[in-house]
Image: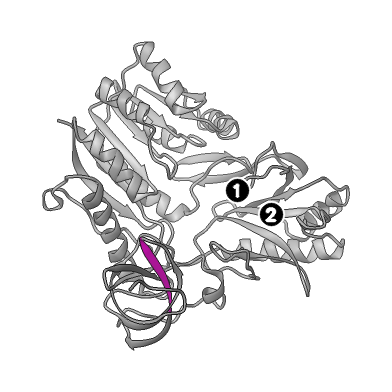
Amino acid sequence: MGLIVGDKIKLDIRKQGINGEGIGYYNKTLVFVPGAITKEKIYAEVVFVTNNYAIANIIDFIRKSTKRVEPLCKYYKDCGGCQMQHIEYTEQLKIKQSILKQSLKKYTNIDLNKIKIDKTLGMNYPYKYRNRSQMPFKNTNFGLALGFYKPNTNNFVYVDECIIHHDKINLINKTALRILRKYKFKAYDKQNKEGVLLFLVTRYFEQTDSASITFVIKEYKDKLKEVANDLIKELSIIKSVSYTINDQKTSLVITDRIKMINGKSWINSNFKDFKIKVSPDAFHQLNTVQMGLMYDHIIDNIELNKNSVVFDLYSGIGITSLILAKQSHMVYGIDYSKASIKDAYENAKINKIDNVKFITGHVEKEMPKLIKLGIKPNLVIMDPPRKGLDRSIIESILRIKPKQIVYISCNPSTLAKNLKDLLKLYNIKSIKPVDMFPNTASVESITIMSLK
């Protein structure tokens, strides 16, 4: 007899899932348990059932893991954003390496004993690392609030301070919320179609003590000028205040162009030897500390010279391109974001680097154009979105056969699927998990490959 919602069961947790949950089996039925840890034995209540699996919540522990710790965040149980904060950090790093191995085992025929999968590169202090926040507004019984929605629900959790946000981001968000309340702003209500505020997007760079704020709204209100003036007057670290209209039915937050209210249309930062500009809607890695370690690893494991040509796919604001341009003849960066490409050109100009070319467009369309021009790269480096590489991109790479490939991945499953195809012509030199998002289930990695 199968499980039904409401069943109380005993479970041995066998492993961690890709979303940080514990996984056990009940009469051969796969059961996911949020908050459970490998080797724990628990009582759980079934809350969701399908033909293939069930989800259960912990009622009590029969045996607790020695790796279980008390989460530092007061909102941890309600928010759900940091799926692993109840697990000792050194164990989190082992789990992330294991999740990567599980994906490779599931989707490829790689002999894991014959390739180098490094230990996960962690942080000395796995909190307060995010340089950007994106929080929804909500009208509550105690007024306008900022917070998060519990994953897969419509349950809003008021969060006045996020433990993985930089302290200055928390300060800015609290200040913005107080000023918005002062001017009687309301969150947009889907039911009665009233209010204007949707999201607050904040970015802060410690290197230059500079921040930007973007209000994502349903319609513009002149009072936002007063809000912006008050923000900049009260917090001198805020250099840019903007807004964008979002009237689309989509999960995307920023869907239209950014319009300035006060200050500059970018903020400055420093990274290694580079000075960079970043627009509010341009992509920049969320963890600056780990980003530095990631690039150190890449530079130490590739071979370039003054004759080398590089394709930088999903190039963002051009940081990767600028770093590699110092060791190469020419770097071609491709990204679909107009804002990112605009910043990339600005950053090349600021840093007086002229052996780079940036192209706005989708990689699967723009990369073949470069190939048709007879441009052949020695190295292809790519940092694709979670969905991984389009089949046509893999085919292009296999056709031009660059000597080296660097694949920066944020999704072990799509990485493994893409590697399966690339292994036709390439060997894996190493795979390095990098913990860009401590205390969450996100697993980032760097795969270095060489032509057979």
> Among all residues in the image, which is located at the extreme front?
1
Image coordinates for residue 247, horizontal then vertical, percent: 73, 43
Q: Magenta stretch: residue 54 in it?
A: yes
The residue identified by callout 2 is: 199
- The numbered mark at residue 191 is none
Position in image of residue 77 (x %, y %): 52, 76
Label 1 Cα crowd, 10 Å radius (few <14 / some 14-19 / many 20+): few
Quadrant holding the N terminus: bottom left
Q: Left or right: where does residue 365 sit relative to residue 175?
A: left
Judge whether 256 appears above or below 127 on screen: above
Q: Seen in the image, is 380 located left or right of residue 137?
A: left
Q: Nearer the viewer, residue 189 or 145?
A: 189
Residue at disc 2, secondary structure: strand
Q: Secondary structure at mark 1?
A: loop
Which mark is nearer the camera, 2 or 1?
Answer: 1
21 w.r.t. 207: above or below? below
Which residue range is magenta in the image? Answer: 52-57
> From this viewpoint, is residue 263 visible?
yes
Front position in the image: 19 or 33:
33
The residue tagged 1 is: 251
Q: Residue at x 62, y 40 (%)?
A: 279
Residue type of the residue flagged with mark 1: Ser
Q: Residue at x 30, y 65 (%)?
A: 95
Q: In which quadrant of the rendered image does the C terminus lie?
A: top left
Q: Report the residue at 78% width, 57% height from top.
A: 191
Towards the viewer: 294 or 177: 177
Residue in the image at 72% along x and 56% along y: 236
Give the crowd class for mark 2: few <14, some 14-19, many >=20 residues within 10 Å. Answer: many
What amino acid is labelled 2 in the image?
A: Phe
